[in-house]
Image (cartoon, grey):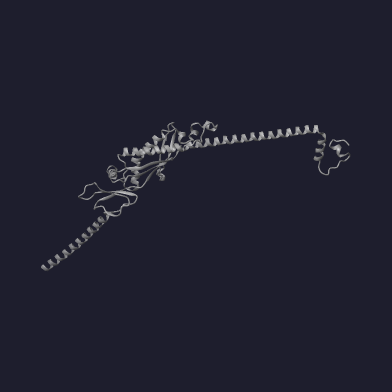
């Protein structure tokens, strides 16, 4: 009995040792994974915050890491969240977005000062402010929140949703304010076709004015308003280098079709006017030629009356070579005497 008890005791001890070894191996693997996960790098296009997450830590920000930061130890159980640091753009399309087709462009239209509904094509350009204090403030206000289910740092989609909720309304307001200060024809000269199509067809309105200077002023106003409103609305200078590039001011498809038709009508009128003018000029030229010919004939007749001999000489010169007179002589043919 003692021998068996001892053997049983030894067998139990061996199993426990094996279990402990296996458990220790698992712990070591987990510890290695946690340790390796605590080493992070920063991409050249990102700025990152390191949030504390250890059992003895708070939930604050331990550091802000700048773009192109090398691999470093951020701390066990800490997490690193990144935001885009390079210049970004927000595209505004003159056509309505078709989300079911994967179109992510945003559509915007607004009235001008004379109440013509126009569509904007352009893009807002901006960069995220990478100043450490500014980044901490942004993360505290917006990084811990979700926008349509995602945090701003959750890849490009999370950032896009943040912009859609927080950035886009401010941009819309800046566009609306700037466009609302101008009349339609000051932004797009073809607006004359919409407002005074009859006058355009008759050629009583100028549709060839240059709007480039106005468009430059508008895009500068949009950029200035957008930058100021973003800071006041979001509560900090989170974006810098804010500007807007206005490509063109357009109309909806139905209005554009009307403009195209008016343009064709005006071109047709211009063509007909040109053709009519050409016919008038041709008729005037032909009349002048006829008048010159008649004057030449009258002058010749007067000369022949004053000099009959010259008339007979010219008449003989006009006869074909080798002509012979039958039943008379050459003088009788040209009206002379024998």
Q: Position of residue 281 (x, y in %)?
A: 64, 34
Q: Is residue 154 left or right of residue 272?
A: left
Which residue is nearer to you in this view: 307 or 22? 307
Which residue is nearer to you in this view: 318 or 92? 318
Which residue is nearer to you in this view: 308 or 162? 308
Q: Which residue is at a point 82% across and 34% down the rendered structure image?
A: 308
Q: Position of residue 268 (x, y in %)?
A: 57, 36
Q: How many marks?
A: 0
Which residue is nearer to you in this view: 9 or 215? 215
Quarter holding the N terminus is: bottom left
Quarter holding the C terminus is: top right
Q: Quadrant of residue 73?
A: bottom left
Q: Is residue 103 left or right of residue 327?
A: left
Q: Residue furthest left?
A: 2
In the rendered image, is residue 92 in sight?
no
Q: Position of residue 168 (x, y in %)?
A: 36, 40
Q: Which residue is at a point 40% across and 41% down the rendered structure image?
A: 244
Q: Position of residue 49 (x, y in %)?
A: 28, 48
Q: Which residue is at a point 40% across and 35% down the rendered structure image?
A: 178
Q: Is residue 335 left or right of residue 200?
A: right
In the rendered image, is residue 35 in sight?
yes
């Amino acid at each position: 009995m003692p021998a068996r008890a001892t053997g049983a005791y030894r067998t139990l001890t061996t199993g426990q040792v094996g279990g402990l070894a296996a458990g220790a191996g698992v712990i070591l693997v987990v510890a290695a994974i946690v340790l390796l996960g605590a080493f992070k790098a920063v991409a050249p296009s990102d700025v990152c915050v390191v949030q504390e997450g250890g059992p003895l830590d708070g939930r604050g920000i331990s550091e802000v890491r700048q773009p192109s930061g090398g691999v470093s130890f951020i701390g066990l159980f800490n997490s690193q969240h990144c935001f885009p640091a390079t210049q970004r753009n927000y595209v505004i399309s003159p056509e309505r977005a078709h989300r079911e087709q994967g179109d992510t462009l945003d559509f915007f239209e607004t009235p001008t000062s004379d109440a013509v509904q126009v569509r904007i094509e352009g893009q807002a350009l901006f960069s995220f402010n990478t100043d450490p204090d500014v980044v901490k403030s942004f993360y505290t206000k917006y990084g811990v929140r979700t926008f349509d289910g995602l945090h701003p740092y959750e890849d490009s989609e999370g950032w896009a949703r943040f912009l859609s909720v927080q950035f886009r309304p401010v941009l819309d307001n800046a566009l609306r304010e700037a466009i609302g200060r101008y009349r339609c024809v000051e932004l797009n000269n073809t607006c004359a076709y919409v407002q005074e199509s009859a006058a355009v067809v008759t050629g009583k309105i100028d549709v060839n004015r240059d709007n480039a200077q106005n468009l430059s002023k508008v895009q500068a106003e949009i950029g200035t308003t957008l930058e100021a409103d973003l800071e006041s609305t979001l509560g900090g200078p989170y974006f810098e280098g804010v500007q807007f590039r206005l490509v063109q001011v357009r109309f909806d498809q139905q209005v554009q079709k009307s403009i195209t038709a008016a343009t064709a009508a005006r071109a047709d009128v211009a063509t007909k006017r040109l053709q009519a003018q050409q016919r008038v000029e041709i008729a005037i030229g032909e009349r002048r030629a006829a008048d010159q010919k008649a004057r030449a004939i009258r002058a010749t007749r007067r000369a022949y009356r004053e000099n009959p001999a010259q008339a007979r000489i010219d008449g003989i010169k006009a006869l074909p070579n080798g002509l012979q007179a039958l039943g008379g002589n050459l003088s009788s043919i040209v009206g002379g005497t024998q």
